[in-house]
Image (spheres, rainbow, N blue to C red):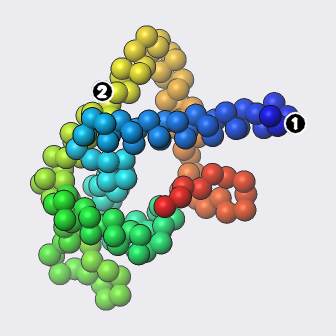
């Protein structure tokens, strides 16, 4: 227990976020959903950012380039993403990634499965509670892409 109630509350938030992530990963493995948590995150990132490169992913997720390279290679092997063939690559910038048709279908299936679980978990919550939860999560995520090194923020590990 912390010396201040806020410390205890911050620890509780941290523990709850870990639980959400752990349950989501376990559920994906248990239910054989189309994509693992990591695959879903990366495929969604590629889908939402046309022209993205592996170096962009590494920067956004604060991961080592070699880690991202391995993950991207796995996504390519699974047929979820491919390198663009547009020839618009800039020298030294890496190749542009894009979703394949299979990747789009798998992302849609994975997102639908995740939304179904969320809908089930929030069953019985009032519309006002769901709206308040959504607003709090939006507030929590504002500025989440900005570095928090040395500022006591939580960092994703890769």
Task: Name the outermost residue toward the bottom.
Answer: 91
Q: Quadrant of residue 139?
A: top right
Does the rendering let one see residue 92? yes
Element assignment for label 2: helix
Element assignment for label 1: loop
Which quadrant of the rendered structure holds the N terminus?
A: top right
Badge 2 or badge 1: first in the primary sequence: 1
Q: Which residue is mark 2?
A: 116
Residue drawn at point x = 53 percent, y = 30 percent:
135
**Up/down of 142 relative to 19, above or below:** below
Q: Count neighbours of disc 2 (C-alpha within 10 A) and say few if under 14, some if 14 to 19, many if 20 or more.
A: few
Residue 157: x %, y % from top left: 53, 58
Instruction: Pick the residue in front: 43 or 11.
Output: 11
Residue drawn at point x = 41 percent, y = 70 percent:
67
Task: Name the outermost residue toward the right.
Answer: 3
Q: Which residue is mark 1?
A: 3
Q: Nearer the viewer, mark 2 or mark 1?
A: 1
Residue drawn at point x = 65 percent, y = 59 percent:
148
Checking the image for residue 20, the label placed there is: none
Residue 134: x %, y % from top left: 49, 29
Q: Are marks 2 and 1 in contact (CB under 8 Å)?
A: no
Q: Count neighbours of disc 1 (C-alpha within 10 A) and say few if under 14, some if 14 to 19, many if 20 or more.
A: few
Does the rendering let one see residue 52? no
Q: Is residue 137 left or right of residue 73?
A: right
Residue 50: x %, y % from top left: 28, 62
Instruction: Pick the residue in front: 104 or 90.
Output: 104
**Up/down of 128 relative to 29, above or below:** above
Residue 127: x %, y % from top left: 45, 14
Task: Name the outermost residue toward the left.
Answer: 101
Label 2 to label 1: alpha-carbon separation? 39 Å
């Amino acid at each position: 227990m912390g010396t201040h109630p806020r410390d205890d509350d911050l620890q509780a938030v941290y523990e709850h976020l870990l639980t959400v992530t752990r349950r989501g990963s376990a559920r994906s493995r248990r239910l054989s959903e189309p994509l693992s948590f990591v695959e879903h995150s990366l495929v969604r990132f590629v889908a939402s950012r046309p022209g993205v490169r592996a170096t962009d992913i590494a920067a956004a997720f604060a991961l080592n380039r070699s880690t991202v390279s391995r993950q991207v290679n796995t996504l390519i092997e699974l047929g979820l993403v491919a390198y663009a063939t547009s020839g618009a690559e800039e020298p030294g910038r890496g190749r542009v990634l894009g979703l394949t048709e299979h990747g789009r279908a798998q992302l849609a299936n994975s997102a639908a499965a995740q939304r179904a679980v969320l809908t089930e978990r929030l069953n019985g919550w009032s519309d006002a509670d769901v709206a308040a939860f959504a607003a709090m999560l939006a507030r929590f995520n504002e500025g989440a892409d900005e570095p928090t090194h040395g500022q006591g923020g939580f960092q994703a590990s890769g």
